[in-house]
Image (cartoon, rainbow, N blue to C red):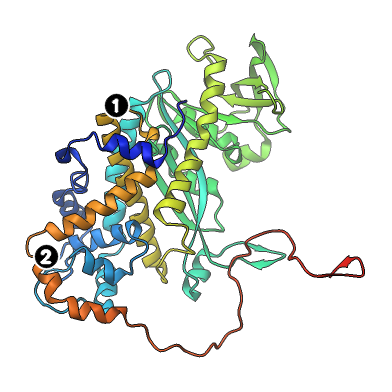
């Protein structure tokens, strides 16, 4: 696989793109599609408001794209409110507009676009004719409100409960473009396999999904093999794996038969007693011996070396999660929203915004004749920030309205009077597992 690029290389590529070919930011999410989403989910605006539903959709997306701006500043700077008054929109009106919109239009838009974009890119960047995907889970911190903590929960160890409630997210990602094809999330207490159950049907025929080792389950393998044509998997084997060798295909390459446990068959009676797979044993220089299990049984069509190499592209989904949490969300402490419904709306907005950036990278990659993973996500995001701000200024009437309300907006820079501290100092997140360093006395650490 070619090495990933840095910001300077990405921007040098983008300088070659003609201005009219730069992202319009709305071509992938046109007004007609947003209107269809609102109509299909019953959230179309009937009464004309300063923040109609179609503008609130963009507000939720911009909450992810502009993490450094408050929600009301996003409305002001991007001119999302209709120019019916010179007074800026108050925060309460923004929150009410989000509540009226709900999460359903964002879910509809994500599912409609993700299934098209990711499946198309996975087919273009395939593995021996198979669309390449990966499935894995991660967590997002949400605002620490009583409602969020009661619903989402979090870790609870000997150190106590987690500093923030945690949302568990599982996604199906096109490996070589990082586009999300499907996602499921909810309370932290639900296992990843529970969320993944809704993702398996989204895999297309003639596909290969790279699984994290935590998804090793006969029920998962059975679903993949019986719910579509040529839907394959590859997964790293656990140390306690036992199987009967049926046929040797070569050195470290065997067809093996695994016996499904009685407990698994009691839970899923449709499971067979035995299942036939292919086991690959290998060792990379400087690493311990490893083993993979796959449903790609044809060693001529899918050589062992190729399967081993493609498995290590599993890390692309980890890089995708890093882009989402480190670059897009800027490693902020948590999502903004303090209620469960608002968190769910914001989370779908984050996933859709991430895909919008990634879809632009796919398009720019084609113009620059490079693979999508060769472009810098951080560089693309910076360019999109700049374009959004320029477009907001070029919109008809926006400059006049911004200047007319400038005095009122300046008042938002004024901070409230400082309040005396009413709670002791405490950290929400322990930054290291090491013990705190203390002065040494009598040769012993205090």
Left or right: residue 412 versus residue 159 is: left
Q: Residue furthest right?
A: 442
- Picture residue at 22% right of the left edge, 66% below the top: 77
- Picture residue at 57% right of the left edge, 22% below the top: 308
Asked if residue 385 can be seen in this view, the reply is yes
Q: Position of residue 124 (x, y in %)?
A: 33, 25
For the residues labelled 2 and 1, say whether their Cβ atoms are less than 8 Å apart.
no
Left or right: residue 351 versus residue 225 is: left
Disc 1 on helix, strand or loop? Answer: loop
Q: Position of residue 165 (x, y in %)?
A: 53, 65
Q: Earlier in the sequence, mark 2 or mark 1?
A: 1
The image quadrant that residue 304 belongs to is top right
Q: Nearer the viewer, residue 282 or 301?
A: 282
- Picture residue at 75% right of the left edge, 63% below the top: 435
The label shown at residue 43 is none
Q: Position of residue 17 (x, y in %)?
A: 22, 35
In this picture, is 312 found above or below 167? above
Image quarter in which the C terminus is found: bottom right
In this picture, is 116 found above or below 31? above
The image quadrant that residue 180 belongs to is top left
Residue highlighted by disc 2: 398
Residue highlighted by disc 1: 369
- Label 2 packing within 10 angstroms: few (<14), some (14-19), many (20+): many
Q: Nearer the viewer, residue 150 or 272?
A: 150
- Picture residue at 19% right of the left edge, 48% below the top: 26
In this picture, is 10 found above or below 1? below
């Amino acid at each position: 696989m070619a090495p990933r690029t840095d910001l300077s290389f990405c921007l040098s590529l983008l300088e070659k793109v003609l201005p009219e070919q730069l992202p319009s930011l709305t071509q992938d999410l046109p007004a007609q599609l947003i209107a269809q989403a609102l109509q299909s989910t019953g959230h179309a605006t009937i009464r004309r408001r300063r923040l109609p539903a179609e503008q609130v959709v963009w507000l939720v997306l911009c909450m992810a794209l502009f993490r450094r701006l408050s929600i009301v500043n996003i409305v002001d700077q991007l001119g999302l409110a209709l120019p019916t008054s010179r007074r800026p929109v108050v925060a309460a009106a923004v929150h009410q507009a989000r509540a009226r919109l709900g999460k359903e239009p964002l879910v509809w838009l994500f599912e409609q676009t993700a299934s098209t974009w990711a499946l198309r890119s996975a087919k273009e960047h395939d593995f021996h004719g198979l669309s390449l995907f990966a499935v894995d889970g991660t967590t997002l911190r949400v605002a620490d409100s009583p409602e969020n903590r009661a619903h989402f929960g979090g870790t609870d160890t000997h150190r106590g409960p987690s500093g923030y409630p945690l949302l568990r997210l599982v996604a199906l990602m096109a490996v070589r473009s990082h586009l999300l094809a499907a996602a499921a999330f909810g309370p932290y207490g639900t296992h990843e396999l529970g969320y993944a159950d809704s993702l398996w049907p989204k895999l297309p025929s003639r596909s290969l999904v790279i699984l994290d080792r935590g998804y090793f389950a006969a029920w998962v393998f059975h679903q993949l093999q019986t719910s579509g044509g040529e839907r394959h998997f590859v997964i790293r084997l656990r140390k306690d794996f036992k199987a009967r060798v049926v046929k040797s295909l070569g050195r470290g390459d065997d067809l093996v038969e695994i016996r499904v446990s009685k407990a698994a068959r009691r839970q899923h009676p449709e499971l067979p007693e035995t299942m036939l797979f292919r086991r690959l044993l290998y060792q990379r220089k400087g690493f311990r011996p490893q083993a993979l299990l796959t449903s790609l049984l044809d060693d001529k069509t899918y050589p062992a070396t190729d399967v081993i190499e493609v498995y290590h592209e599993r890390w692309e989904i980890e890089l995708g999660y890093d882009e989402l949490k480190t670059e897009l969300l800027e490693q902020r402490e948590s999502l903004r929203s303090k209620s469960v419904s608002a968190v769910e709306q914001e989370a779908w907005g984050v996933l859709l915004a991430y895909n919008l950036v990634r879809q632009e990278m796919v398009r720019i990659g084609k113009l620059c004749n490079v693979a999508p993973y060769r472009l810098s996500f951080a560089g693309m995001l910076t360019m999109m920030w700049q374009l959004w701000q320029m477009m907001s200024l070029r919109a008809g009437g926006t400059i006049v309205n911004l200047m007319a309300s400038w005095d009122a907006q300046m008042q938002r820079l004024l901070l409230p009077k400082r309040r005396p501290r009413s709670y002791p100092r405490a950290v929400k997140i322990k930054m290291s597992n090491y013990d705190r360093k203390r002065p040494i006395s009598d040769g012993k650490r205090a």
